[in-house]
Structure formats: C-alpha cells, structure tokens
Amino acid sequence: MNKSYYKSLNVSYIKGKHKLEILENNFREIRKNEVLVKVKYSSLNYKDALSITGKTRITRKETLIPGLDLSGMIVKTNSKKFKKGEKVLASGAGLGELINGGFTEYSYVPEDVLVRIPKNLSQIDTMRLGTAGFTAAIAIEKMILNKQDKGSGPILITGATGGVGSISLSILSKLGYETIALTRKKSSIKYLKSLGANQILQFEKKIDNKILGPKIFGGAIDNIGGEVLDWIIKSTKDNGNIVSIGMACDPNLKTTVFPLIMRGVNILGISSTNYKGNRQKIWDILSNKYKPKNLNIINKESIGLNDIPKYSKNLLLGKNTGRIIIKMY
Ligand SMILES: NC(=O)c1ccc[n+]([C@@H]2O[C@H](COP(=O)([O-])OP(=O)(O)OC[C@H]3O[C@@H](n4cnc5c(N)ncnc54)[C@H](OP(=O)(O)O)[C@@H]3O)[C@@H](O)[C@H]2O)c1
C-alpha cells in the first residue's frame, strides 16, 4: 500500500442533522478477525439513495460510510479464514447501516460478513448483482421452497425496471417461468423484453373495493407495496406465493384475509440484511443456475464517489433503469 490515507463518502447525524461529506481517512491497526479490502466496485441501492439524500435515516451510528455492497481484494488480514490477495465481496449484512459500507477506497471488514467471489463471477458482475441480485435470489429460493411451480401461472414483477425487478425478471425467465413485468416507464418495453418479460403491464392506481378479484397471477415479486400489493393479493391464483420485498411506492397495505384463507395465497417476507441462511451458497447459485444472461444490459453505468448524490436523487425519483456501479479505480 503506497497511500497514507483513503477517501470515503460519509454520512453523519450530529444533533439529528444529516450531513454528507467526502473524507480523507488515516489507515488504522487491523483488528482480530478483520480484513482490509481495497475496494474496486460498489453499487447504488434504493436504501443507499435514502441514506445519501437523508430522506430516511439508514445509518445507525453518528458517522458511518454508507453503501450496502462492496467488492475488492484483501490487502491485509488478521483472519484465519481469509488470505491476503483473495477476491471477496460483502453485501447487506449490516454494511452501510451498522458497520461501514462500500462507498470507500478501502474498508475494514469483519470476516463473518465476507463472501469469496465465486469462480464464474467477475468482480464487476458481483456488484452488477449486489444486494439487488442477492435479494432477488433469496426471494426466488423462498418461492420455490414454497412450491411455486412453472405451470402455476405467470409471475408478476413490480418496479420491473429497478435493480431487484430487473434481476428477478431475468432469473425467473432463465428458470423457465412465465413473467409479467409491471412498470411506470412506457419507454422501457424493449428493455424488459430483452430481460425475458412475456408480458408488460403499465402501472396504474388499482383502487377497487372487491375482496377477491379474478385469478391472474401464479405469484409475484413485489418491490412497490401499497395499493398495487393489495390488488396482487386478491388477483393471485390458489396457493400462489407473493414475495414482499420493497415499498418504493407505499408502505401501507389495506387488505383482507379472504385471499389467504379462501385461496391459500401466501405472503412471504424478505430481509436481505437479516438473512440467516448461508450467504456464500446464495452467491454460488447466483454465479451459476441463477446468473442473469444480461448483466451488461442491466448495468450500463459506472460512476465515481462524487457522482453518488446526483444519482441517488434520480433513483428516488424512479428515473433509473437497472443497476448503477460505483467504480473506485
Ligand atoms: N427486503 C429487502 O431485503 C430489500 C432488498 C433490496 C431492496 N429492497 C427494497 O425493494 C425496493 C426496490 O429496490 P431497488 O434497489 O430495486 O430500487 P430501484 O432500483 O430504485 O427500483 C425501484 C423501482 O420501483 C418503481 N418505483 C419507484 N418509485 C415508485 C413509485 N413511487 N410508485 C411506483 N413505482 C415506483 C420503479 O420501477 P418502474 O419505473 O419500472 O415502475 C423503480 O425503478 C425498494 O423499496 C428497496 O428498499 C428491499
């Protein structure tokens, strides 16, 4: 290491006031069971955008480096599990919330949140996937575990042009599921078709007071919540699985238990941060069976640390398509 300091983007809350700044940090002694990673890539997730803009407080410390994801190489280690020179990634698991995240040139990372980059994934592909890819994978795993068959009807994906939406769509079509993409972007038809969408629906407000609707969807991956989720619940076929991932539109849900008790519809929850399974196993699946064919279509843009605030604002306005990579060097 020939640098005496490293740059990071920091969020602080001093007396409750949100502040964002680029800092130059001194290197410190490495702690037990910790490694120092030279970060090559990070990525921009919805939660990161909330953190950067201060719209919602995501960081749980007075000062913290945001960024749910990072991918890089170990340059120092005080861990028995990881060697110097190994390529690793970290995604979710408290990064950018409880511990320093990926918007930095170097990161001190506890060994228990690190994952070895699987053979079939390049370093950039790990961040093209990032938390969005990890979340899509655990959502689909949960649906399959709950017996979501390919013949049980089309899977609806909402917020389809977003990170989780794009990757879920791509994985489900690769696995042979029929898919319906729901989007607000009229201009994204070609993009969604290229990810394998069999049908595309335009987003509209779905207010109706019926307790049960026509059975349309075999299941769903929902990134937006609110009235749309309410409509999905009453439009899902018998025993279908709906995975609730996000609330980009609305966190509130006004529904009845009728679809659950008359049709056996299942609502499954996902928390990528609190995932208790084996993270390495999910990344191995993402590098193989679930690896989207079109990661270079899903991610077209690489930005620098300085660009993160501008891109965060656009992401929260729902203007972005696919995934954004942050390139450190
Ligand atoms: N549970 C978890 O562990 C977990 C993990 C990752 C993400 N999430 C959550 O999942 C959601 C999606 O995350 P992401 O990273 O994919 O975000 P993203 O890339 O910003 O995608 C969100 C998409 O939702 C749609 N959308 C945005 N604002 C909307 C609004 N006001 N009304 C209706 N649709 C809107 C847009 O798609 P269209 O323009 O195509 O409609 C947008 O591209 C977020 O709420 C995020 O916090 C949860």
Image: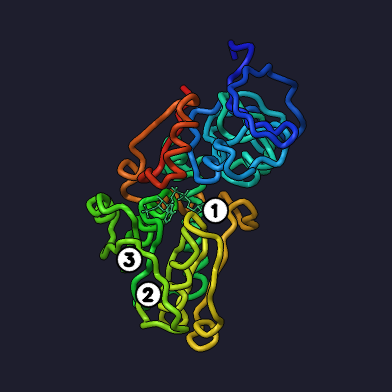
Earlier residue among tags 1 and 2: 2
Task: Residue 219: name its quadrant.
Answer: bottom left
Q: Amino acid at mark 2?
A: Phe
Q: CA distance from mark 3 to mark 1?
A: 25 Å
The residue at the point 47 percent across, 57 percent down is: 249
Residue 285: % across, % down: 47, 54
The residue at the point 44 percent across, 35 percent down is: 311
Q: Is mark 3 within 8 Å of ligand 1?
A: no
Left or right of 284? Residue 76 is right
7 or 129: nearer the eye?
A: 7
Residue 142: % across, % down: 52, 66
Circle 1 — which element?
helix
Q: Nearer the viewer, mark 3 or mark 2?
A: 2
Q: Amino acid at mark 1?
A: Lys
Left or right of 212? Residue 179 is left
Residue 215: % across, % down: 37, 81
Q: CA distance from mark 1 to mark 2?
A: 29 Å
Disc 3 crowd rating (10 Å Cα; few below 14, some 14-19, many 20+) is many
**Label 1: which residue?**
281
Give the image's coloring scheme.
rainbow
Instruction: Please tell me the numbered disc located at residue 217.
Output: 2
Circle 3 — which element?
strand
27 or 261: nearer the eye?
A: 261
**Label 3: which residue?**
179
